[in-house]
Amino acid sequence: MKSANKEIIQSYILSSSKYDFNILEKRIIYRLVEISQSLLEGQKLDNTFTFQEDLWENKLISLSLRSIVGKDYTNLEVVKKSLKSLREKSIVFEDEKEFEVCGVVDSVKFIKQSSICEFRVNRKVWELIVNFSKGFRKFELKTLFKLNSVYSCRFYELLVIKK
């Protein structure tokens, strides 16, 4: 699962949702989309990612810091702040019958010695990531990771032509 020139398919629900992510949080979301797509296609994950499922169908994911920020990034305080911020953000699920709030990710852990980020993704959030009922957008992962602003990422997501 190499990210060089790889195209990812993101649910239009995720592309068009309201959010206030910073660039590192957004890159984590892109990695979740990439992991989910690889699993749906039956591809093996490379050694920068691990994926497990617990008894309640929550997803346990670990990924290398380099897969989010690149190899030249050294400001770990910004990474820790972004991981904490992403943990504190919520997704609201509401219909005629129910109202439910979930964190985007849960139980964030950053292992400094190995530069590994670990977190749990609620099954409802994972279902949102793989929900293509409202359509999808196809992006080049390499292009997304070259963008340095969450606004340029958002602009790219919303304007890319549906395939």
Image (cartoon, rainbow, N blue to C red):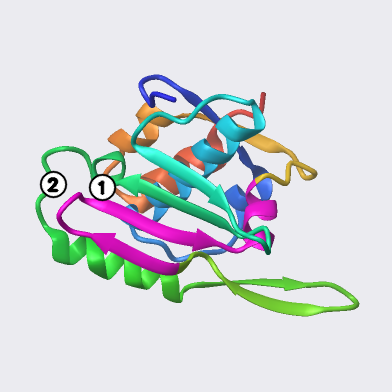
Q: Which residues are magenta?
A: 107-129
| Residue type, label 1 | Leu
Q: Is residue 63 magenta?
A: no
Q: Position of residue 26 (x, y in %)?
A: 41, 52
At a point 68% along the width and 64% down the height, the residue shown is 56
Label 2, label 1: how far apart the Cα atoms are: 9 Å
Direction front: furthest residue:
55
At x 72% / y 77%, what residue is drawn? 100
Query: Based on the displayed image, in which of its 4 quarters is residue 148 positioned?
Result: top left
Q: Which comes sooner in the sequence, label 2 or label 1?
A: 1
Residue 32, numbered label: none
Instruction: Name the image quarter holding the C terminus.
Output: top right
Residue 105 drawn at (x, y percent)? 49, 64
Q: Secondary structure at mark 2?
A: loop
Question: CB atoms at circles 2 and 1 under 8 Å apart?
Answer: yes
Q: Amino acid at mark 2?
A: Tyr
Q: Position of residue 95 (x, y in %)?
A: 84, 72
Q: Which sits in the foreground, 83 or 15? A: 83
Direction from residue 153 to residue 127 in the image, left or right: right
Provide residue 4's location: percent of width, then percent of height. Answer: 35, 21
Q: Nearer the viewer, mark 2 or mark 1?
A: 1
Label 1, on which residue? 65
- Mark 2 packing: few (<14 Cα in 10 Å), some, or many (20+)? few
Q: Is residue 65 visible from the viewing direction of this image? A: yes
Is residue 130 toward the left or the right of residue 74 in the image?
right
Give the quadrant of the N terminus.
top left
Can you identify the residue that label 2 sits on? 73
